[in-house]
Amino acid sequence: MTVFSPEVVDAVLNHMNGDHVDDNVLIVKAFSGREATEATMNDLDEQGGTWRYVAEGEEHQLHIPWPSAPLSERPEIRREVVVLYDAACEKLGVTPRVH
């Protein structure tokens, strides 16, 4: 059982999938090593986030551990997603935007 309420999980997923569509794809490309064409964050808990993505016409799932797991508070989720985003940018040679 996650330490985050269903309302917190839903709010984060809605935010990531509504406001950070490109970031989801970037994170999945970097951590899956595949050329993802679309990606959505579909779950999270104190240990990491889970994304569903499409690569080469097939759907896949990828769980990425939070660098500072386990998390216990909602603000930590944002911090960890930013860490994953920055790491993805570095791996892929993409200039990150200012947070």
Image (cartoon, grey):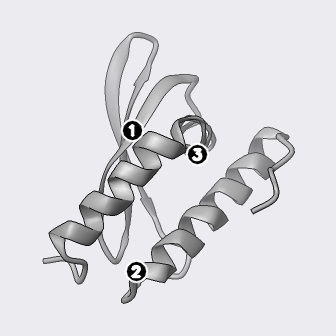
The residue tagged 1 is: 40
Quarter residue 49 falls in: bottom left
Residue with the most extreme left position: 1
- Mark before the other along the chain sequence, 3 or 2: 3
Q: Amino acid at mark 1?
A: Thr
Assess whether mark 2 and mark 1 are in contact (beta carbons under 8 angstroms).
Answer: no
Q: Locate the N terminus and report the quarter of the image it occupies.
A: bottom left
Which residue corresponds to the image point at 59% horizontal and 43% vertical from the top-left?
A: 23
| Tag 3 secondary structure | helix
Q: How many marks?
A: 3
Residue with the most extreme bottom position: 72
Mark 3 or mark 2: which is in front? 2
Report the front residue among 28 and 20. Answer: 20
Query: How far apart, in angstroms, are the residues tagged by discs 1 and 2?
Result: 19 Å
Which residue corresponds to the image point at 61% horizontal and 60% vertical from the top-left?
A: 84
As drawn, 69 above or below 6: below
Assess whether mark 2 and mark 3 are in contact (beta carbons under 8 angstroms).
Answer: no
Query: How far apart, in angstroms, are the residues tagged by discs 1 and 3?
Result: 10 Å
Which residue corresponds to the image point at 34% horizontal and 77% vertical from the top-left?
A: 46
The residue tagged 3 is: 27
As drawn, 61 above or below 72: above
Q: Amino acid at mark 3?
A: Ile
The residue tagged 2 is: 74
Which residue corresponds to the image point at 28% horizontal and 70% vertical from the top-left?
A: 8
| Tag 2 secondary structure | helix
